[in-house]
Amino acid sequence: MATYTPMIEQYLRIKAEAQDAFLFFRLGDFYEMFFDDAILAAKELEITLTGRDGGAEEKIPMCGVPYHSADNYIHRLIEKGYKVAICEQMEDPSQTKGMVRREIVRVITPGTIMEGKTIGERTNNYIVSVTERQGLMALAACDLSTGELYATSAPSNKEWLRDEIGLYDPAEIIGDPELLDWITGQAAPLGKPVVYTPWAKAKEESARAQFGEAEWIRLEPERRDNISLLVGYLSETQKRSLGQLTKITAYEPEHFMILDPFTRRNLELVETVRERSKKGSLLWLLDRTETSMGSRLLRRWIDKPLLQKSRIEERLEAVEHLHGAFILREDLRGALQDIYDLERLVGRVAFGNANGRDLLALKTSLRQVPAMKDLCGGSASSTLRRIASAMDECEDLAGMIDAAIADDPPVSVRDGGIIKAGYHERLDELREAGMNGKRWIAELEAAERQATGIKSLKIGYNKVFGYYIEVTKSNLASLPEGRYERKQTLANAERFVTPELKEKETLILEAEEKTVDLEYALFNELRERIAADIPRLQKLAEQIAEIDVLRSMAAVASDNGFVKPKLTDGYDLVVEQGRHPVVESVMKDTAFIANGTALRKDEASILLITGPNMAGKSTYMRQVALISILAQIGSFVPAGKAEIPLVDRIFTRIGAADDLIGGQSTFMVEMADIQIMTEKATPRSLIIIDELGRGTSTSEGMAIAQAVIEYVHDRIGCKALVSTHFHELAHLEHSLTGLSNYSMAVQESGDKVHFLRKLIPGAADTSYGIYCARLAGLPEEIIGRAYGLLIGLEEKGPKLTGTGAGVAKAPLADVPQAKEDAGQVVRETAAAALLTEDVASKEAAAAVEAVAEPLASEGGPVVQLSIFGDEEPSVQAKAAARVAEDPGMRTLINLIKNADLMNMTPLQAMQLVNDLKMKAKDL
Ligand SMILES: Nc1ncnc2c1ncn2[C@@H]1O[C@H](COP(=O)(O)OP(=O)(O)OP(=O)(O)O)[C@@H](O)[C@H]1O
């Protein structure tokens, strides 16, 4: 064991308390790091790694950052997902004999950081704690910088937990290790890198004291447990009062529409799928708020659309009035523009790091409240009047700040200049003494100049020598002997002091020191006084945010031609002239084509939408979901008219987010989503599936698509929009009474296709996939070849399926040649497979034939099996005969033959497809 110096021993003792954090160990004007911390920090922060003698033979790795610029380094580490423990000197080294006592004063973690650019102004920064006890899962989400704390719980269900966590987009998650393990293993698209800390130390008593007995006992036991844990973690890391946490906003999950993280991403509610930017999302379109608090609240509303009609209508009522009152909107905007981020200001007041400028910002904000209150109080909206009447103007607090804080206070609270003259008698006296002293010095300077005749003589001040008389070398001869004591020699001047100057200096410096100390004490007193009123300020911040959001929604509605939706308790969703709000807003040169939607219980609750690529299917389906969400957050909607039933959950299965999922195949993800949908959807849900079944072979994909659609129709009975490339599924309209075929209209002219973006009744018969490939700029050679292959395939298949019926219509000059080529390739491939020694290929080829034949003869489902064409029949027939002897093949054939399709449930059909696949694999 190495023996270290006492200081390194002290370091190691303290480091043991903060194993998972960088320990910033204060040594004079630096924070130093040692050992592994130093090696890693030097790399992460790109600072020099040095060594220090620490008593052992080898030097200890060390690096450090200056105390004054530490914040910058701390934020860089936090951004990279590390924690930083700040260890300060707890005693004045000049007054201490031996080693200075040091302690960790705060552990800064990604989820508890209060300031700096790590936390976006208009976004929350949450730490989430998760627990599970006796079949119940609980979650609490806390933003220390704003003082928000949300709590909820539900019967144990990991998907629920994942969805709920997704809403908060936390920077840090603490709690039960098993739950954390599961969450880390999830592919759920959490927005930013998350720090996970298993945590089991609860502080129930502190939590109870923090929120008060009345609030505490109202909470369910599992929520109490969870919050006790969170408070345990916060007090252990923050080591100070958490005065900004004044209330717990508990909520029941079933009061809000459920949107899983994939749906939120697919619908680009708060960020876009590709760039993950706010720009281009629904939030971006809706966010015309003036305050950061408003912006954060709007996001929470989008995250949690309401399910209670009365609450939605309350919001709609306010939006409607603001929509029609341009002047009121503008007046409110004017007032809101001068309101700072009250929530974060209050957070800093509670945390003890608010400065003079923060308090001035608080005062300026509070000064706007009376005008807002008047404007809302006098409006025609009962919702706005209700908010206004509950608003506390906090005039007393604004008055206190106004009386105390100077008009232009410095950033630091320790250097004086922060308190106004006239606020405190003793302070005024001390300032006067200081001023008098300075005046005396000015007079002395004039007198000395006169007495010595040296015009350039001046009296100056520095921290080391205090006040001095400075005389240039050329004038030294004019200085009388005796009275002047030499203190410092410069290149071309000498500095002196006199006894009377020293005496005055003591008086002046004493007065200045006392002034600064008193100012600091007075400032703290005021800050604490305001801290005692935090709940009032937080309530006010909420009301201002709400007005800001309602005003913003009205402005968006007015500028974008939205209308007020009619909410119903019924089933039917009927939209006339609906538009996709974001796509419409970014379209510059062309107009967005509006489309209606009618999903009715007794007519069509499922729309099966076919149509070419690029025709606008995804846009249309997303638009229906967004209109529902907008209506349920209390916003107007982009439509001519809309009747919206309350939707309890929106499921989306849209390919765009697939690239986010690591480790699982697109198809498996699709199936897992569908599985959750079949389990969780209710008749009040809305399902949106884009290109169902596309992740697997055409035949299986189509079978699954049909089975799923039937299940949604027969078992769930909810509203659904399904787009598909499988035009064959159009026949479902005959067997499913609640399904209607629709397609996106296109117009062909010459070899061009025009997308009309209009939803029309009836199914489409082509995909124009290759046409779209050409639009995307693929080389003509590939396009020509693809058309050729397609035509070759079409002519050879047992039945023409899916894509490409329209291809023949495209008059491409090189099609005949391409077709010829394609036929040749197909022939060669089939022949090669059968004639080589590759047994697997031969058998596969024959198996295809063998399976196809009985299916065709029994009129079973049509399968796209056109890869071999009908050349070389004798070779294939021989191979088929050989394979038919195989017992495995026979089982497979029998399975298909005996399948009673008419009496199968959709899930049984899926099971059958799966069994077939397994059996085929074994062959
Ligand atoms: N109603 C509309 N009015 C005007 N332009 C539209 C409309 N709908 C879609 N578009 C434009 O068409 C483009 C393609 O739309 P979308 O992605 O919805 O097509 P799609 O049919 O889903 O295609 P794919 O099957 O290839 O995904 C959009 O990016 C948008 O710019």
Image (spheres, grey):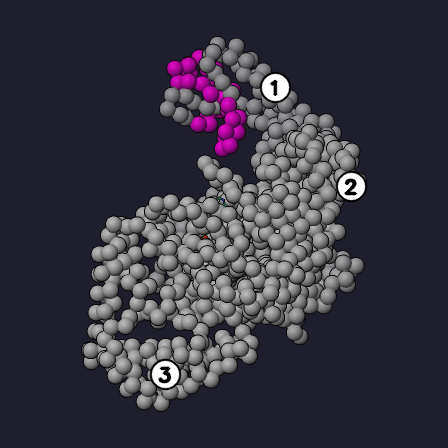
Q: Earlier in the sequence, mark 1 or mark 2?
A: 2
The quadrant where residue 332 appears: top right
Q: In the picture shown, does residue 143 fall above or below 349? A: below
x, y percentage for residue 23? Answer: 49, 57
x, y percentage for residue 465? Answer: 50, 30
Q: Which mark is residue 439?
A: 1
The residue where tag 3 is placed is: 922
Q: Which mark is residue 382?
A: 2
At mark 3, the secondary structure is helix
Q: Are marks 3 and 1 in contact (CB under 8 Å)?
A: no
- The kind of residue on which mark 2 rests is Ser
Q: Which mark is residue 211?
A: none
* 3D distance between C-alphas at marks 2 and 3: 70 Å
Residue at the image point whose x is 45% and y is 64% from the top: 728
The quadrant in which the N terminus is found is bottom left
Residue closer to the observer: 81 or 43: 81
At mark 1, the secondary structure is helix
